[in-house]
Image (cartoon, rainbow, N blue to C red):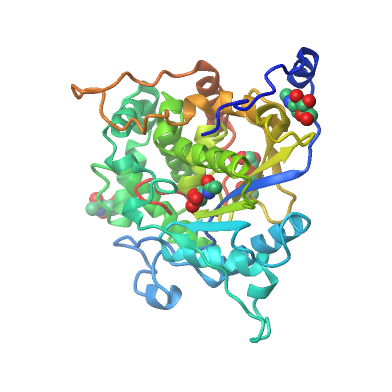
Amino acid sequence: MAGPGAQGHRAVPLLLLLLLGTQTVAKGPLVFVALVFRHGDRAPLASYPLDPHKEAAPTLWPRGLGQLTGEGVRQQLELGRFLRNRYQHFLSPEYWREEVYIRSTDFDRTLESALANLAGLYPEAAPGTPESSWRPIPVHTVPVTEDKLLRFPARSCPRYRELLREATEATEYQAALEGWTDFLIRLGNSTGLSLVGEPLRRAWKVLDTLICQKAHSLPLPAWASPDVLRTLTQISALDIGAHVGPPRAAEKAQLTGGILLDAILANFSRTQHLGLPLKMVMYSAHDSTLLALQGALGLYDGHTPPYAACLGFEFQRHRGDQDEEEGNVTISLFYRNDSSRPPLTLRLPGCPDPCTLGRFRQLTAPARPPAHGIPCHSLHEPAATPAATMVPLLAGAVAVLAALSMGLGLLAWRPSCPGAWGGPV
Ligand SMILES: *[C@@H]1O[C@H](CO)[C@@H](O)[C@H](O)[C@H]1NC(C)=O
Ligand SMILES: *[C@@H]1O[C@H](CO)[C@@H](O)[C@H](O)[C@H]1NC(C)=O
Ligand SMILES: *[C@@H]1O[C@H](CO)[C@@H](O)[C@H](O)[C@H]1NC(C)=O
Ligand SMILES: *[C@@H]1O[C@H](CO)[C@@H](O)[C@H](O)[C@H]1NC(C)=O
């Protein structure tokens, strides 16, 4: 990764630094974009024993459980068209392999989503293009077991499991769980599922099935009242919070979303230093990917990213000095989670929008993996290296946001499929 101000121009005028430090920086021309989006609408991942729609599943979901639906394809096409519109003066009109790189997780629904998105972004890949000019756009992937970027080594990572245990053994978590005991027993009764062992994870799966059915206008069983759905959403938010929020949110991020964040920053730096024509990297992934990234940015607020939600990093360069990357480059974050509105501008806690790259790096450093590698080893193993220290600033921001979301986010019930941390969804 590029060191700050590695090549010359050490004597940055103090006045200029002060100005940069205190005032909002105007946006300069866009030089690089990284996009991370969730796949489109999909079939439920599973059924449950007493699911009234179980028998009809093959007709309801002809492509199979967990697969992208026609609606999901349209959502991605729409996202691609939005991106074309946003970047029409930035990207070449036609696909050029040096300029754009697209990577997906190795799941049918994310691969298809990437292809549908690109059909909206590039005219030559669009549906209805005359056969003589039609060109599909390539999407890269790696096997699920080797995907360190978009699927995290969380489950196979002893340190992450320790951190998760710490979160789930915390008093607040246990108290919340205890409050839901009767609810979970009733849920077990209504669904025919055994909820012992991993009650929360199974509860999500039920929620996922119900939400997908509801999104496709199927009648829900009588027990699945709005109240029950709301409680299931709260349960799911508690569990997501344990995965990406406090305690030790920054350390969790180093093992999950911080890896992707680091890759995005490294990608930008390398491109600039080598003078490569690369302008955009697109990642087609899961809500778990977005949630982990939000956790790493201190921006998780209790909302599960809906289908085709897109988080964008836009790098702008000011005053065109190639060597002074840190002070002259800013990053803006946008989040598009509602196709009927302009995307939200997100602010990294502690930094105005746009945030200078130097400050962005500094604030996110605790959430990104250390240079010597991803610290997965358990602290209780003899050869363990010192624990990554938690930086109070970022962790504090996460805690505040998480606390807020407990009050706000949980009330806002939205019909979209929730995340199942047991696997990317
Ligand atoms: C589920 O609840 C019904 C009605 O309360 C009860 O009759 C039945 O025994 C329960 N079933 C199980 C498996 O607990
Ligand atoms: C950017 O990231 C992509 C995918 O993560 C990777 O394949 C590519 O080599 C990177 N390019 C640069 C210049 O870092
Ligand atoms: C930004 O670019 C200008 C013009 O090239 C240069 O004078 C300045 O030192 C650079 N760095 C910062 C932090 O503004
Ligand atoms: C979009 O995200 C914002 C911020 O997390 C949230 O307040 C809003 O409810 C979300 N909207 C939808 C439609 O998901």
Nearer to us in this view, 230 or 84: 84
Considering the image in quadrants, where does the C terminus appear?
Answer: bottom left
Observer able to see residue 56: no
Q: Quadrant of residue 75?
A: bottom right
Residue 204 percent location from the top left of the image: 39, 48
| Residue 50 as seen in the image, left or right of residue 390 | left
Residue 35 percent location from the top left of the image: 60, 50
| Residue 108 as seen in the image, left or right of residue 323 | left
Name the residue: 47% across, 35% down: 258
Farthest front residue? 8
Q: Quadrant of residue 118?
A: bottom right
Vertical relation: 41 (above or below) 5: below
Nearer to us in this view, 46 or 221: 46
Vertical relation: 118 (above or below) 179: below
Residue 225 percent location from the top left of the image: 48, 52
Farthest left residue? 382
Vertical relation: 215 (above or below) 267: below
Name the residue: 42% across, 74% down: 63
Name the residue: 28% across, 56% down: 192
Quadrant containing ligand 4 reads top right
In this rendering, the count of numbered labels is 0
Name the residue: 70% across, 34% down: 330
Observer able to see residue 175: yes
Residue 100 percent location from the top left of the image: 61, 57
